[in-house]
Image (spheres, rainbow, N blue to C red):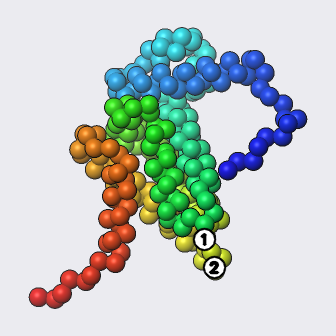
Amino acid sequence: MKPDAPDDQPKPGLRERKQARARNTLIAEAMRLFSAKGYDETTVDEIADAAEVSRRTLFRMFETKGDIVLAWTRGMTQTLTEALAACPADMPPADAMMHAFTSLVPRIAANRQDTYAFVFLIEKTPSLQTVSLQKYGKWEDCLADGLARRIAERKNRKTAARLMARCGIAIFRTALDEWIRLKGRPALVPLLQNTYALQSSLWVAPVLAEP
């Protein structure tokens, strides 16, 4: 977990807190509009109106609509990083990684309907594919770093951590693909856990006998 901030560390002033609230409101309203209307169909003016800020204020914080989505994904990356770091030190690395993924799901949105809308938006909007790939790249980096601290000392520890991180993201993305195929009807966390179990079983699956 992150260490406690020193008592003498300066706290944000009123102006900084107001800016942070305005930024968070802009991100929340933009994601709501994107998931309801579509990313390409939502205008900057609509986002500014929903967040009750001026167009000029929006552009001071974000240069493009894509930057708003990137800011949202950075919050998810931080959540994933903190969830992995908070796992007990004696938890097996792969289990800790999957716990971090399952901890991430409730933070995507307040309810299953909104979570599905956000997931569909990020995964299936063509103009957001670059953003999605950047998100997964950041996830891989943060997971590989956290897992390297958990894997027993070995010559190829960093390579093993990177491989595990990539496998974990593949599991997560496969579960999302299945969830989208099922139109969000099942709960996502059990689906993610089942996908992890399936992947684990495939590594030890028996070889098919020759005819």
Per the image, label 2 sits on a secondary structure element best described as: loop
Q: Looking at the image, which residue is at 70% across and 21% down?
A: 17
Residue underneath mark 1: 151
Give, as a three-letter code, the residue at label 2: Arg
Residue 158 placement (x, y as % from top left): 61, 70
Q: Looking at the image, which residue is at 65% across and 24% down?
A: 20
Count every numbered label the image shows and give the total: 2
**Image quarter in which the C terminus is found:** bottom left
* Residue 132 sits above or below residue 192 on the image: above
Residue 52 placement (x, y as % from top left): 54, 11
Assess disc 2: are there few (<14), some (14-19) or many (≥20) residues with their C-alpha within 10 Å of its C-alpha. few
Assess disc 1: are there few (<14), some (14-19) or many (≥20) residues with their C-alpha within 10 Å of its C-alpha. some
In the image, is 62 to the left or to the right of 98? right
Q: Looking at the image, which residue is at 80% across and 28% down?
A: 11
Q: Quadrant of residue 32?
A: top left
Which of these two is toward me, 133 or 170?
170
In the image, is 207 to the left or to the right of 25? left
Which of these two is toward me, 172 or 70?
172
Which of these two is toward me, 93 or 124?
93
Residue underneath mark 2: 154
Q: Quadrant of residue 109?
A: top left
Let me know if residue 131 appears in the view.
yes
* CB atoms of marks 1 and 2 within 8 Å: yes
Q: Residue furthest left?
A: 211
Alpha carbons under labels 1 and 2: distance apart? 8 Å
- Mark sitting on residue 96: none
